[in-house]
């Protein structure tokens, strides 16, 4: 029995162009940053800061990896890797359900944007920082941090867009903001890549 040929991997440059041309929520300041070079043949990375009413609420990074021959552990030839971090109240930081809730922000965002994906993986961390000694006058800091990755199913360059929409909603949810309401379109990015 003859196997059908494997379809050619989508050119990375086309998917990259979709990321570079994406219109981000106005609360996000997005810029390209150096991407890791040894994980996959092709990669790009962006960093975003969430700013609301002139105040920085949180930040995140998104790395797009591409291995044309595919990667067995990814279950595909593309992989998205993210880190999202935001300040939270001390009461929230010690809540035992915070990890599950933070993970649900990612899964919910992917589902809400119909971002077809496989093999999600990640960790959530609650960080409580209390300064001592010469730093004792500094305020306490409490953060939630989500590190996750998933394999986007990309058959066309535009298939990355729902994943970008989900990622920006994840960042905003991590910062305590609501996702972009359905039917609302961003007029212009705060800063283009």
Image (tube, rainbow, N blue to C red):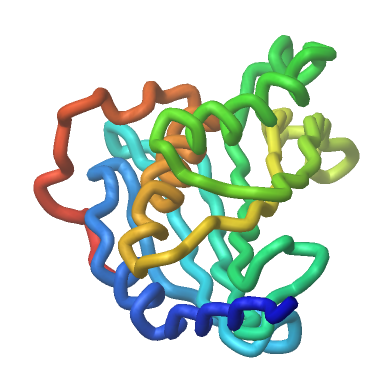
- Give coordinates of residue 46: x percent, y percent: 47, 67
Q: Is residue 32 visible?
A: yes
Q: For the view shown, which residue lies furthest in the front direction?
A: 1
- Give coordinates of residue 32: x percent, y percent: 43, 73
Left or right of residue 186, residue 14 in this image: right
Left or right of residue 70, residue 123 in this image: right
Residue at x-position 64% and y-position 59%:
81
Q: Where 121 falls versus 52 (above or below)?
A: below
* Image quadrant containing the C terminus: bottom left
Residue at x-position 79% and y-position 31%:
126
Residue at x-position 74% and y-position 63%:
74
Residue at x-position 55% and y-position 69%:
64
- Residue 12 versus residue 23: which sits nearer the camera? 12
- Give coordinates of residue 156: x percent, y percent: 36, 67
Q: For the view shown, which residue lies furthest in the left direction?
A: 187
- Give coordinates of residue 4: x percent, y percent: 60, 77
Q: Quadrant of residue 94?
A: top right
* Image quadrant containing the N terminus: bottom right
Q: Where 21 falls versus 94 (above or below)?
A: below
Left or right of residue 78, residue 75 in this image: right
Q: Where 7 falls versus 26 (above or below)?
A: below
Question: How many numbered marks appear?
Answer: 0
- Residue 177 versus residue 163: which sits nearer the camera? 163
Q: For the view shown, which residue lies furthest in the right direction?
A: 133
Q: Is residue 35 visible?
A: no
Left or right of residue 30, residue 189 in this image: left
Q: Quadrant of residue 15?
A: bottom left
- Residue 173 versus residue 13: which sits nearer the camera? 13
């Amino acid at each position: 029995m003859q196997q059908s040929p494997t379809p050619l991997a989508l050119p990375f440059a086309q998917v990259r162009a979709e990321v570079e041309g994406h219109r981000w929520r106005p609360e996000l300041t997005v810029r390209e940053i150096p991407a890791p070079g040894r994980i996959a043949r092709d990669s790009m990375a962006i960093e975003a800061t969430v700013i609301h009413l002139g105040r920085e609420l949180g930040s995140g990074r998104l790395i797009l990896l591409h291995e044309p021959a595919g990667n067995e552990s990814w279950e595909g030839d593309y992989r998205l890797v993210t880190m999202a971090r935001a300040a939270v109240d001390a009461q929230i930081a010690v809540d035992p359900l915070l990890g599950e809730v933070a993970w649900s922000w990612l899964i919910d965002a992917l589902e809400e944007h119909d971002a077809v994906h496989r093999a999600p993986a990640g960790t959530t961390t609650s960080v409580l920082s209390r300064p001592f000694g010469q730093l004792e006058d500094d305020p306490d800091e409490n953060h939630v941090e989500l590190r996750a990755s998933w394999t986007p199913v990309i058959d066309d360059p535009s298939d990355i867009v729902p994943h970008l929409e989900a990622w920006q909603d994840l960042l905003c949810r991590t910062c305590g903001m609501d996702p972009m309401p359905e039917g609302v379109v961003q007029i212009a990015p705060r800063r283009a890549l």
